[in-house]
Image (tube, helix red, strand yellow):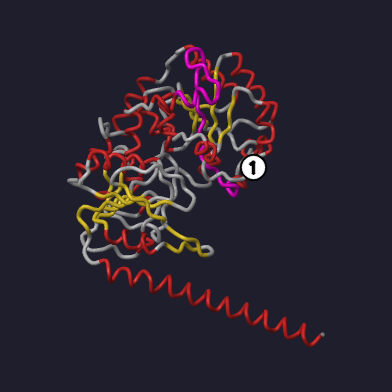
């Protein structure tokens, strides 16, 4: 019996080694042979093929793809999606699974490699360098996902492009530095998602108000969009309690959350707090959210569940609360009050830092340092008191290059 057991163990271990060896062989073949093989059969680019590459079918990619589908029927659009994404089919748009996973490295699908090399124009939002050297005559455009105040630099491993979009002149130098590229590559054409501000989707607004029981005629809707603060940043923070307890600046305890909720009730305010899509970890506040009746803390997944795009909702809000996030820059286009929570500015300078030497000079709104200060801002919104209209107007001159149609302007630039 012992001999039999030993033989079974040996056979099992041998089979494991064989399976692991086969896995390594397949992995080696896939990552080296497939990209080379696809490149050999692709041939010339298709002048009428446009690829939009993003991990998510939303925001800039979705707006641009649907604009092309509706207004440029002579072009075929390919959009990459991830496994499990729910997509509404659209004319002239073909959805391709972007990648399979292989440990800590994406195994991009054969179709993804093919279209990444076949498309004449490629618009991407996060990274496109995975495909390697671009095909001859290809034009690679980095749409990115915002221009704000935060510093840092992008990895050259992930980015190599011909052009990139920013909202206005203020961000040309900072983005060129961020991506270590020539300023001539940075185009002040704005983002396709800005079209959502022009084409207000009434059904989305009504759906949201109904879902959360908001009386649009009697209540003000404010949205709070905190930027992402990684946990390792908090090691340098003088007071990281709010981020640990709630992930929301200024809210350091359940007592303060309830206090703000009561304040909203008294002043007929509904406050939406959307967590950053990179904040996956739970906070102590999360288990008490049911106690809050006027403050709704929602994750990216919950926005997906309700079928609502953030940039479709923003036009229906009465004011924004944020900080160093690029959404503050975008919100200027709506010409509505903005509160910037900047109490952690000195701490943030020690971590990621800022792309602008004096960021406060380019934050045209209320600079909030305390919860009491935030309440004062909210009261002004309710009462219609406008303190920063002229400042916003002046800031627009350098922060935005305004257009009646952003998607169309981008396409016109490339003669599409």
- Who is closer to the viewer here, 328 or 121? 121
Specify the quadrant of the image occupied by residue 193. top left
Specify the quadrant of the image occupied by residue 145. top left
Residue at image location 81% in from the left, 85% down from the top = 2
Residue at image location 57% in from the left, 14% down from the top = 267
- Who is closer to the viewer here, 162 or 50? 50
Check disc 1 and report the residue beneath it.
282
Q: Can you say whether 403 is above or below 5 in the image?
A: above
Left/right of residue 67 with respect to residue 227 in the rendered view: left
In magenta stretch: residue 276:
no
Residue 233 visible within the image: yes
- Who is closer to the viewer here, 14 or 120? 14
Location of residue 289 in the rendering, given as x and y in whole percent from the top left corner = 65, 31
Location of residue 383 in the rendering, given as x and y in whole percent from the top left corner = 48, 11
The total number of labels drawn is 1
Secondary structure beneath dot 1 equals loop
Location of residue 54 in the rendering, given as x and y in whole percent from the top left corner = 39, 50
Q: Can you say whether 140 is above or below 261 in the image?
A: below
Q: Can you say whether 390 is above or below 225 in the image?
A: above
Location of residue 303 in the rendering, given as x and y in whole percent from the top left corner = 51, 36
Specify the quadrant of the image occupied by residue 334. top left
Name the image quarter holding the N terminus.
bottom right
Which contiguous range is marked in magenta?
Answer: 206-233
Left/right of residue 342 with respect to residue 231 in the rendered view: left
């Amino acid at each position: 019996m012992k001999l039999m057991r030993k033989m079974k163990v040996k056979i099992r271990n041998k089979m494991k080694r064989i399976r692991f060896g086969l896995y390594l062989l397949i992995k080696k073949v896939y990552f080296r042979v497939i990209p080379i093989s696809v490149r050999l059969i692709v041939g010339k680019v298709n002048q009428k093929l446009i690829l939009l590459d993003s991990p998510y079918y939303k925001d800039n990619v979705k707006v641009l793809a649907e604009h092309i589908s509706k207004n440029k029927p002579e072009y075929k659009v390919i959009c990459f999606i991830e496994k499990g994404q729910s997509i509404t089919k659209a004319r002239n748009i073909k959805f391709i699974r972007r990648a399979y996973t292989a440990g800590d490295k994406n195994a991009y699908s054969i179709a993804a490699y093919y279209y990444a090399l076949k498309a004449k124009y490629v618009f991407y939002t996060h990274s496109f360098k995975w495909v390697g050297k671009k095909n001859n005559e290809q034009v690679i455009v980095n749409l990115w996902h915002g221009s704000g105040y935060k510093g840092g630099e992008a990895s050259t491993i992930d980015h190599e492009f011909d052009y990139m979009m920013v909202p206005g002149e203020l961000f040309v130098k900072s983005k060129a530095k961020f991506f270590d590229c020539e300023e001539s590559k940075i185009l002040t054409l704005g983002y396709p998602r800005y079209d959502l501000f022009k084409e207000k989707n009434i059904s989305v607004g009504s759906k949201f108000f109904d879902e959360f029981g908001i009386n649009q005629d009697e209540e003000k809707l404010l949205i709070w969009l905190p930027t992402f603060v990684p946990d390792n940043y908090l090691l340098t923070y003088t007071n990281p309690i709010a981020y640990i307890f709630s992930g929301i600046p200024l809210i350091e305890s359940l007592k303060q959350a309830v206090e703000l909720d009561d304040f909203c009730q008294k002043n007929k305010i509904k406050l939406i707090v959307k967590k950053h899509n990179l904040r996956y970890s739970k906070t102590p506040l999360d288990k008490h959210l049911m106690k809050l009746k006027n403050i709704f803390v929602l994750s990216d997944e919950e926005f997906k569940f309700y079928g609502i795009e953030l940039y479709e909702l923003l036009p229906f809000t009465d004011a924004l609360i944020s900080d160093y996030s690029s959404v503050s820059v975008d919100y200027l286009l709506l010409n509505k009050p903005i509160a910037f929570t900047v109490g952690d500015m000195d701490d943030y300078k020690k971590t990621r830092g800022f792309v602008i030497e004096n960021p406060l000079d380019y934050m045209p709104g209320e600079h909030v340092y305390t919860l009491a200060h935030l309440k004062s801002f909210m009261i002004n919104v309710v009462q219609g008191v406008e303190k920063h209209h002229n400042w916003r107007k002046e800031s627009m001159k350098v922060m935005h290059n305004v257009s009646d149609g952003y998607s169309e302007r981008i396409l016109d630039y490339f003669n599409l």
